[in-house]
Each structure stands twice: as structure tokens, then as C-alpha cells.
Image (tube, rainbow, N blue to C red):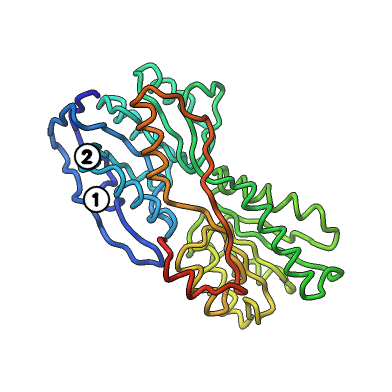
Amino acid sequence: MKKAYIMLCMAGCAAGILAGCGGKIEQTAEPFLYGDLTEVGDEYVVVGFAQVGSESDWRRANTNSFNETFTEENGYYLLYEDGQQKQENQLKAMRNFILQEVDYIVLDPIVETGWDGVLEEAKDAGIPVILSDRYAETADASLYTCWVGSDFEEEGRRAGEWLAMYLENRGRTREEIRIVTLQGTPGSTAQLGRTEGFGQILEQHGNWTMLDRQSGDFTQAKGEEVMEQFLEDYEDIDVVVCENDNMAFGAVEAIRKAGRTCGPDGDIIVICFDAMEAALEAMMRGEINAAFECNPLLGPEVDEIIQALERGEPVEKTRYVEETYYDTSMDLETILENRAY
């Protein structure tokens, strides 16, 4: 293990290391200070984590998973950077990590492209890069050690299959089904995978029509804004597919303001991804029909990978986490009692 001299604070550290499901946000660590020249000894594995931001409940739970895992008690010293949804911030953070000679870099790429240069710099410095949650498209896969996260394309397919079953159970297999999609950040792995997976099922149903797809950038405010526009542009919408929970919350608010109804007893079916605690609570209120899980607890998974690398063991290039889905036919109250996020 190297000694790392913490030359400066990662700019977003004070605001970014948060816990939160269902909007409950707590700071769980003291922020690093600008100009801190603390020397970290050989007893710690120093990890630099370049996070996307704090745009959603899922992201906050994901950050907290890393914060709880990579502690000094567990033999780690964690440097954290909130990218604030900007790739340039993450590139700067990674180069700072390289200058500080961290032992490992964990990168959750905001978008898939544009990483080859900095990944090459990390490789030249002998620092393994672990991709978490989102992919980075590279010309040379050896530039990163491995990737761990969700099978986003499978999530999209599962949502499409669920919708087909739901419509069949209600005798609507021959009706024209008009769909709109609130997409995530364009070019992000979750957006690409969920759009592609759902699109594969869409093509199997000649009576399904995708009226429009627009980005809500994974935020509630933007989701509400885009859904308002959809409701103005299209008189008859049967289904809204929201590529994360927070956009679904915004869509529900826009539907309500427009005097429309949604959920199991409404006229618009709402499907979302992430399945955080707040989404299950919205299902219990009858606002959302189904939520497809995206497991945010990736800290322990990355810890296992780093420990294997520390022992000199090979690691698999791709590692998927286990996930499921939830809908209003389930005992959501009992599920929530044991829900970790």
C-alpha cells in the first residue's frame, strides 16, 4: 500500500457523502478540509471514488453504501468527489486521485464515452480502476480492472414483460397502448440499457406505440417538467415509463396537476426503475404501478473486489448484482419493514 498525501479536498466532499432513501438525508462523515496535508500511513488502502452526483434517492443510497464500507475501521481511507453531473468534474477528480497516488480508483461514469485518456493515465500510474454502476466505453478494455453493477438492459426487458402481463390480465391485449418514456441522462449506462431493453419488448407488440421519449435527467423537477409537456402534446397516454424513481415522482405530480389519474386505479400506468423505499411507499398510495429494482448497495461488492486484488487473486471482468421488482399486488408494507434502501 502506498502512502497518500492528501493535497486538497475533493470539491464536493462536504455535501456529497450522504445517506438517503425516501428523501431522508443525513451527513455521515466529516468533510475533508482544503489544504489538509494529512499523511495516510501504510496500514490503510486509499481509495478515490468519483461519484456521479447526488441527483436522486438511489444515488444518495449508493454513496452511503461506499461511505459505510470504506472506513478507517475496515482498513480504508476514502477520498470522495461529487461530480455534480458533469464529466469534466469527474475527469479532474480522477487526475487528482492519480496525483495523490491512491491505491485504487472507483469511477461511476456520468456518460459512457470520453474516458480513454484518463484511464490510460491511471494505468500508466499503476492504479487499478474499478467501474461501478455505469460503464465506460473504451478502445482498450485493459484500461479498467472490472465493472460491477446492474444489468440495465435486463431491467428494461423485465419492465416490458411486466407491462405485457399486466395488460393481458386486464383484457387489454388488443387495445392500442400509447406510451411515453422519461429517459435518464443521455448516454448514461442506465439510460441506454433501460431504453434498449424495454424497446426490445416494445417491438414484440404491434399495438404498442411509443409516442415520445425525452430526458428528465434522473431528477424529479425535470421529470415533472417533461411530463407536463407530454400531457400537453398527447391527449391519450396509457403508460409512462420513468427510468428512475425520482422522475416518476415528478410525473405523478404533473399528472395530478393536469387533472388526470394514475396508478392501479387511474388511467395512466406508471412504471419506474430503482425501487427505493419512497417508490414502494408511492405504490402503497396507489400512485405507481410497478418499480424495477436497481440495487444501490455496491460498496460491499467493490470491497470484495479490492480485497481479492490485494491478495493477488484474479477478478471477473463483469459482476452483476441481484435484483427483483415490486408491484401493487405484493405485500409492500411487509417488504418495507425489512427494506435496506
Q: Residue at (61%, 67%) from the top-left corner?
A: 290
Q: Residues within 10 Å of mark 1 (few under 14, many from 20)?
A: some
Q: Earlier in the sequence, mark 1 or mark 2?
A: 2
Q: Quadrant of the C terminus?
A: bottom left
Q: Residue at (53%, 77%) from the top-left corner?
A: 284
Between residue 338 and residue 78, name the one nearer to us. Answer: 338
Q: Which residue is mark 1?
A: 14
Which amino acid does the dot numbered 2 rest on? Cys
The percent coordinates of residue 84 (x first, y second) are 38, 48
Query: Up-down: is 8 above or below 118?
Result: below
> Contact (CB < 8 A) between labels 1 and 2?
yes
Query: Up-down: is 197 above or below 325?
Result: above
Q: Which residue is mark 2?
A: 9
Which amino acid does the dot numbered 1 rest on? Ala
Assign a secondary structure to mark 2.
Answer: loop
Left or right of 14? Residue 178 is: right
The percent coordinates of residue 319 (x first, y second) are 52, 38
The percent coordinates of residue 175 (x first, y second) are 84, 71
Query: Up-down: is 86 above or below 144?
Result: below
Quarter of the figure with residue 310? top left
Query: Up-down: is 98 above or below 163?
Result: above
